Amino acid sequence: RKEVEQDPGPFNVPEGATVAFNCTYSNSASQSFFWYRQDCRKEPKLLMSVYSSGNEDGRFTAQLNRASQYISLLIRDSKLSDSATYLCVVERNRDDKIIFGKGTRLHILP
Amino acid sequence: ETGVTQSPTHLIKTRGQQVTLRCSSQSGHNTVSWYQQALGQGPQFIFQYYREEENGRGNFPPRFSGLQFPNYSSELNVNALELDDSALYLCASSLDSGRAPYNEQFFGPGTRLTVL
């Protein structure tokens, strides 16, 4: 089983819709969780951190479920500019191993 | 713009050759991490340098090596290149305060390496 797994998609979603992605991780010692966004042929950029209590940044909501070992990202009122690949990132217990998922591709359709 | 620069932008090498990739970290950052991203995959962690010392390593063979300099810039060296080494190599810099478990990483634009 891979350490971090994501549905590769693509998710084809009409503009204005709500879309959700999940990411599962296998190592229960994982401490830190993040969502990065990567546009085509560009470098990844931090979208948001994920906390146990859940956190929201505008149209984006991230949640962590430690018991089931998954994190989620919800995008509300999707925009064309949200089209990108969303990478789930997990850092283990200060051994400095940072694991990226393969990413989920999102296409917002006009 | 993150302030992280990488050179060269693109590179073509042949099997068996050696390559050196360079990264200048964002001003004030003391940590540099290197990643390999194959087409259609997420970035894979190669290693991290903190204050000129290797501070963690992923599942890459010893022919992948690195350096960090006193100004915190870094090099990634790959010896005995193989076809599968063809990928985008990303460098990310961060400021490690030693307290937080993770510090936001700022990525450079990457170096695209093709091995023929």
Image: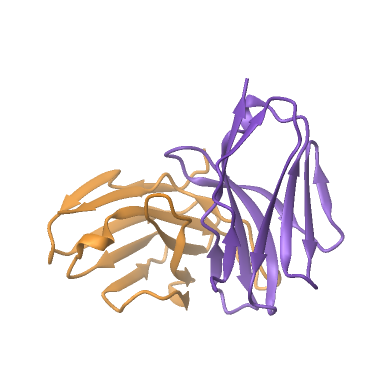
Chain colours: A purple, B orange
Residue lying farthest to the right in this orientation: A53
The correct choice, above or below, for A74 with respect to A76 in the image is: below
Taking B113 as reference, is A77 above or below it?
Answer: above
At a point 32% along the width and 55% down the height, the residue shown is B22
Residue A93: % across, % down: 65, 78
Residue at figure coordinates x 34%, y 70% from the top left:
B66
Image coordinates of residue A10 in percent, x first then y, are: 55, 41
Query: Is B51 on the left or on the right of A60, as rendered?
Result: left
Q: Is residue B27 visible?
A: no
Residue A36 in sight from this viewpoint: yes
Number of numbered discs: 0
In the image, residue B76 above or below residue A1: above
Q: Residue furthest top?
A: A110
- Tell me the residue at 42%/62% (across/down): B34
> Can you say which quadrant of the picture contains the N terminus of chain A?
bottom right
Q: Determine the image quadrant of residue A51.
A: bottom right
Name the foreground residue: B63 vs B85: B85
The residue that appears at 55% across and 59% down in the rendered structure is: A101
The image shows residue B49 at horizontal and vertical percentages of 46, 70
Q: Quadrant of residue B89?
A: bottom left
Rendering coords of residue B104 (x, y %): 62, 56
Task: Quarter of the image for the C terminus of chain A: give it.
Answer: top right
> A27 or B2: which is nearer to us?
A27
